[in-house]
Amino acid sequence: MLDLIKANLSSIIVGAIVLLIVGAVVIKLIRDKKNHKSSCGACCSGCAMAKDCHK
């Protein structure tokens, strides 16, 4: 078992870092959604989807 971990330690570390980053992004999106923040960050007057976003 330890040989398997030793042989794949770099892949495990990279996978864990990617998982943490994805988790942080998902948490940020959920918090922004709860606080009614826009995900695009632009003004709605120039957006082609303005009618569909805010009904």
Image (spheres, rainbow, N blue to C red):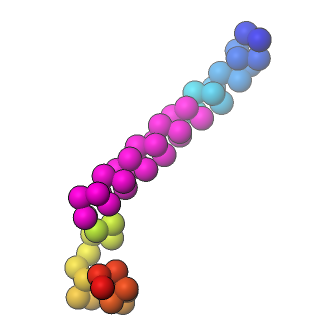
Report if residue 48 lies within the magenta region: no
Q: Residue sitting at 71 percent across and 23 percent down?
A: 8
Residue 42 against residue 27 in the figure, above or below: below
Instruction: Decide if residue 7 is on the left or right side of residue 28.
Output: right
Q: Quadrant of the C terminus?
A: bottom left
* Percent x, y of residue 23: 46, 43
Between 39 and 3, the one lying in front of the other is: 39
Q: Is residue 12 above or below residue 45?
A: above
**x, y percentage for residue 22?**
48, 46
Instruction: Please provide percent x and percent y for residue 31.
Output: 30, 52
Quarter that holds the N terminus: top right
Is residue 27 found left or right of 18 in the rendered image?
left
Is residue 30 covered in magenta? yes
Tell me which residue sits at (60%, 35%) in the image: 15
**Is residue 24 placed above or below 50 in the rendered structure?**
above
Q: Magenta span covers which residues?
A: 15-36
